[in-house]
Image: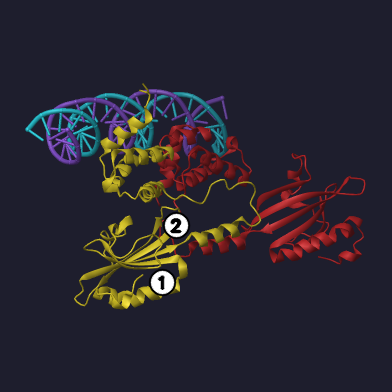
Chain colours: A red, B yellow, C cyan, D purple
Amino acid sequence: MGNVEENPDPRVRTWAPVCRAVALLLGPYAEVVLHDPRTDRVLEIWNPMTSRGPGDPSLLGELDDLTPSAHDVYGPYEKLLADGRRLSSVSAVLRDARDAPSAVLCINLDRTPLEQAAAVLSAFGAPTVQRPEPLFEQDWSERVQHVIGTYVRETGRPIERMTRQDRLAVLGRLDEARVFAVRRAAPVVAGALRVSRSTVYGLLAELRAPSARD
Amino acid sequence: MGNVEENPDPRVRTWAPVCRAVALLLGPYAEVVLHDPRTDRVLEIWNPMTSRGPGDPSLLGELDDLTPSAHDVYGPYEKLLADGRRLSSVSAVLRDARDAPSAVLCINLDRTPLEQAAAVLSAFGAPTVQRPEPLFEQDWSERVQHVIGTYVRETGRPIERMTRQDRLAVLGRLDEARVFAVRRAAPVVAGALRVSRSTVYGLLAELRAPSARD
DNA sequence: TCCAGTCTGGACTTACAGTCCAAGCATGGG
DNA sequence: CCCATGCTTGGACTGTAAGTCCAGACTGGA
């Protein structure tokens, strides 16, 4: 992470103590990044989780999320690393004495170990072979929206641009969530996916009967 | 849990040490019950989680699950207590010297504290605003059991002695819980209430159309 | 004993779940 | 430009479960 005290950039000298403190507090599972929003490059990085370093371009679109809100703090967002690690990410716009944006701070927390620990705990006294038969709630149609929304966010692909594979994946999740045990669910799902009822049943059949294993 | 050493029932004297050991090992979160499968009653109980005691009927249908399998050990099953605690439950058929079934052992582990801990862990570094769904409910048939169980506890009236008013009340709660939005729910509820399908629909109609408000 | 209220099994109707197919519509190769 | 291929679609169809209805059985009380 370089010799910060000698870093020529005044912004780094200003913010480095905060960054180092956060990096220390959250141990090896948090990455702290200071971005230059004008050049879209990394100013400094602590506990890097990828191979990024100062001067590298600010991959990951960490700065893209900043436009819509009126505040200076954003998130937490969920990010997915290429190797499958799941990150919770917050960003903050840092301003200089004249109140002009001078840097952007990002903290990326790797939630994978926490989630593994949670899985160990909740598996204790194993809850049967039956998987957590996910719920149905008063308004199960919100669950449909949630599953689809999550998928769209993960892939960055809106419903209109989904491929057949996308639809198969989404329907797989919905089926696992036992959504189709609810009456009238299929037409609702079809509508949500902008697809006909026939297509839903066709894709579901394909999912449920991979018996054509030739 | 009574003075086990003086318990006149030889089965209790035989199995008590095992039961006590398990109850001690799993601390306050596990209940150990010894059932008499012929009379369908509790022989002895350690760390009771409900108000059951020796001689009480073996509520909860802990013995119902035993028929279908060829082995003598069953589970873990998931059970829902009336107050919402979630149990992992295993049962074992205990046999005497002549290999005849003499008692049934049930161990019920309260998973709630573990799940709370798991929830704390997985909530750490909160993943966005999402997580509207309580990790409560499992599959809907357990919701049925839960509603009925709660009612039985509240009124102290077992299913067999319920009046028409009781059934109306229970069905009202189930209807509010949107249980009947799930396919195949009505027959299951009818079975759980020890009542015919016709009766369920009749009572439901009465509940839903009190329009004759004159 | 009868009566009133309730429950029951079973026959029935309705509504939805799920299947099937001919035709439409993209996409891409020749 | 045409055709071939693969996917989707609306609609017709079948099957299964949801819900209704009713004559008869059961129950407790007068």
* Res A174 seen here: yes
Counting residues from the start of the chain, the first of labels 1 and 2 encountered is: 1
Q: Nearer the viewer, residue A15 or B121?
A: B121
Q: Chain of mark 1?
A: B
Residue B85: x and y, percent?
A: 45, 56
Residue B197: x and y, percent?
A: 27, 38
Residue D28: x and y, percent?
A: 19, 40
Q: Residue A10's image quarter?
A: bottom right
- Residue C16 lies left or right of residue B196; in this view the side is right
- Residue A145 lies left or right of residue C19; in this view the side is right
Q: Nearer the viewer, residue A123 or B202?
A: B202
Q: What residue is at 43 percent from the left and 38 percent from the top?
A: B176
Q: Which residue is mark 2?
A: B86
- Residue A202 lies left or right of residue A89; in this view the side is left
Q: Is residue A141 above or below residue A104?
A: above
Q: Is residue B93 above or below residue A135?
A: below
Circle number at residue B23: 1
User: Do callouts 1 and 2 mark residues in contact (Cβ within 8 Å)?
Assistant: no
Q: Residues within 10 Å of mark 2 (few under 14, many from 20)?
A: many
Query: Mark 2 is on which residue type?
Result: Arg
Q: What residue is at 69 percent from the left and 50 percent from the top?
A: A76
Residue A4: x and y, percent?
A: 87, 64
Query: Mark 1 is on which residue type?
Result: Ala
